Image: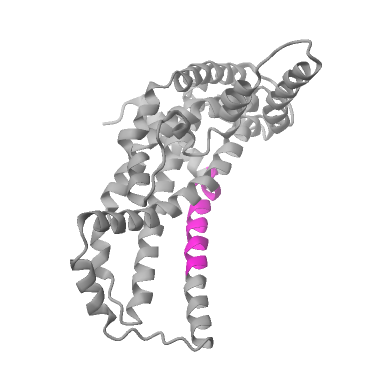
Amino acid sequence: MKTPVLNDMYWLIKRELWEHRGGFVWTPIITGGVFLLLNLMGIITGEVMGRNAGFNVSFGGAGNNMRLLSSNLDKQSMDAVGAGLDMVMYSPTMIIGLVMGFVVFFYCLGTLYDDRRDRSLLFWKSLPISDTATVLSKVVTATIVAPLIVVVVGTLTGIVMLLMFALALSFHGVGVWHLLTLSHPLQVIGNLIGSIPLYLLWALPSVGWLMLCSAWARSKPFLWAVALPVAVGIVMGWFNLLGTLTLQNSWYWRDVVVRILLGVFPGGWFSEVPHVGGSNPAELLSSVGLTHSYAALGSVNLWVGVAAAVAMLAGAIWFRRWRDDS
């Protein structure tokens, strides 16, 4: 049975999804569809160009040869094939997540400002719902619900893409269906879902700053959110150029501007994780797996950002309660 607080949060999040379903629901679906369409166009283009060039696209008994070849693969080769298939499943999620980063950015920037501009704030304030619950529901929608939607749509897109390539090869007598068993779809899904808490922590400073500007700015919140931190960095660089002050502003651009403006894009926490990369797909996927990813929790930079985000969200709640543009 839901408590009143959880019940309120459920309906508030449902309200956010209903009001912004175009961004949170249809954007990832359309992006995934476009991704599949482009891959289908690539397959068709390869078929047409191959036929026009007179290539023999019938592989005959290649299917049996492929099975024989795969049965003789050593463990390292099988791991490499599996990692390559996993990367195919990861790739649409990365692209959809990048697009969703823009959606989350403008959602956080406009959500509290739009409530005041269209006067719907007056209606919501007439309900027995606190400003804290309202703001937190928007934070949960941006940092938990949106990534979950990305994982679901991205994973389904990746699976369909694998099936599409396998089907295209099967038309030429190359049976690669058995190679799909070398992939790890459940592990991919587990890694993507397991990374959502990291996304939440890393994105909080950006979400907090954008919502603070959204609640505080009387007009043009985008200019305040973007121009203000950039202007401060330019002034710091100007003082360094004049030699009047010696300010190492590289940390400001990296740890302040990037965190509060680009933190909503996934994967930023890997900057706090050592030894990311590898000479082959298996090593690369291992370096970005959950075991290595959660090493970012040992970063002071991450937790300083979380503390700053809590303060900024508290400011957003206060401004939402007392800001009156009438």
Identify which residue, 53 or 258, lies in the foreground: 53
Q: Main secondary structure of the magenta part?
A: helix
Identify which residue, 309 or 231, lies in the foreground: 231
Res. 183 image quadrant: bottom left
Residue 33 located within the stretch drawn in magenta? yes
Is residue 231 placed above or below 142 in the rendered structure?
A: above
Res. 198 image quadrant: top left
- Quadrant in the picture for the C terminus: top right
Task: Name the image colouring.
Answer: one colour
- Quadrant in the picture for the N terminus: top left
For the image shown, how many numbered marks are present on the structure?
A: 0
Specify start and end residues of the magenta stretch as a single range: 19-39
Where residue 82 appears, as percent x and y from the top left, is 29, 56
89 vs 184, left or right, is right
Where residue 50 appears, as percent x and y from the top left, is 49, 82
Query: Residue at the location (22% across, 63% down)?
Result: 73
| Residue ranking furthest to the right | 242
Residue 177 located within the stretch drawn in magenta? no
**Residue 326 shows in this picture:** no
Where residue 54 appears, as percent x and y from the top left, is 49, 89
Where residue 287 appears, as percent x and y from the top left, is 36, 39
Query: Residue at the location (66% across, 20% down)?
Result: 249
Identify which residue, 174 or 191, lies in the foreground: 174
**Residue 196 shows in this picture:** yes
199 vs 291, left or right, is right
